[in-house]
Amino acid sequence: MNFRLENSKLIFRKLKISDYKEFKKLFYSCFKKKISYDFFKWRYFSDKFSFCYGVFDTTKLIANVGMKSMKLNNKKNERIFSRHSSMVLSKYRGRGIFSELLEEVKKIFLNDASIIVMWPNENNFASFGIVKKRIIKRKYYLYNTSNRKIKIKKTSNHNIDQLSKFKIFIQSNDNFFLKNFDYFKNRYLSYKNNEYLINKFELKKFTSFFILKKNKDKLGLNYVILDHFGSKYIKSKHLSQLINEMKVIFWSKQKIHKLNNRFINHINLSVGFIKKIDVLKKNTILVNKEFMLGDTDRFITIK
């Protein structure tokens, strides 16, 4: 059903920076979290490809989808999109408005895109009308740890401002998204850079780095493991060492049954192929490709 014909007050359009107040109100209504103007501007207006598209009932924003422009880590480095800030005001849910919103976004903006990465939440599993056989789903398990005090600390923390010092270690071999130096600079130095740090680990001739975010919750100060660069060969050893040294939050592809790890929640991921693709190619695109917690908005500071 076309809801604009049913209700002529509904307006579907791209958001402008001046729509921040309406975006802020809708975000708080849906997630009970405050979002800053700086975040809104940085996330969706820092490049010419990213955007928000919404539905207004007269002047009130009632639904929104945020599309963050990314590059695929392949030979062509083709532009794809990651869907964030998916929300509908509660009284308008169940009417098909959000599905129509996604269809319009796909029709107007995504003609040249082949892939949409989506992070479904408990209120929103809409998928741009992409048929199930063109969607690959993954589930990640989120844990926090209580650190065990060890005598020998083998990792070292560095200010995020030193990122350029470690530039030679940044390669995007195994990541799904293209993660070169520009990616890390724009992601972790352009907004709230005081909240991030670099954790370094060396073993023999190998060097590994995790991007950590300082996080305070009811359990006190801990660190969220958001991203990785450097040696993949010692990445798992680095993670094990870090878990032993600090209170951290991390995700895993498998469930973990250890006393030191407390399950928090699971995070859903859907990779949708807009254009028709054969099964073999669909499966090979994701083979040995890594996603990181920093690819989501889960722990981005929004206050």
Image: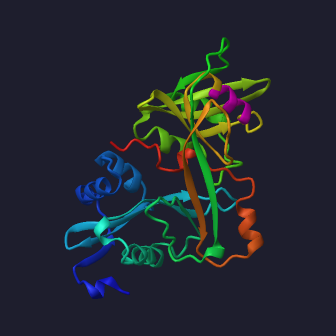
Q: Is residue 67 left or right of residue 205?
A: left
- The residue at the point 32 percent across, 50 percent down is 32
Q: Nearer the viewer, residue 181 or 203?
A: 203
Q: Is residue 238 magenta?
A: yes
- The residue at the point 46 percent across, 79 percent down is 107
Q: Is residue 61 left or right of residue 219?
A: left
Q: Is residue 46 visible?
A: yes
- The residue at the point 75 percent across, 63 percent down is 284
Query: Which residue appears farthest toward the right when viewing the image?
Result: 204
Instruction: Please identify the quarter of the rendering in which residue 12 is found.
Output: bottom left
Q: Which stretch did the figure color magenta?
A: 236-243
Instruction: Please identify the quarter of the rendering in which residue 184 is found.
Output: top right
Q: Quadrant of the C terminus?
A: top left
Main SS, magenta residues = helix
Instruction: Please identify the quarter of the rendering in which residue 156 is found.
Output: top right
Q: Is residue 7 magenta?
A: no
Q: Quick check: 281 above or below 164?
A: below
Query: Which residue appears farthest toward the left when viewing the image?
Result: 59
Q: Position of residue 243 (x, y in %)?
A: 63, 28
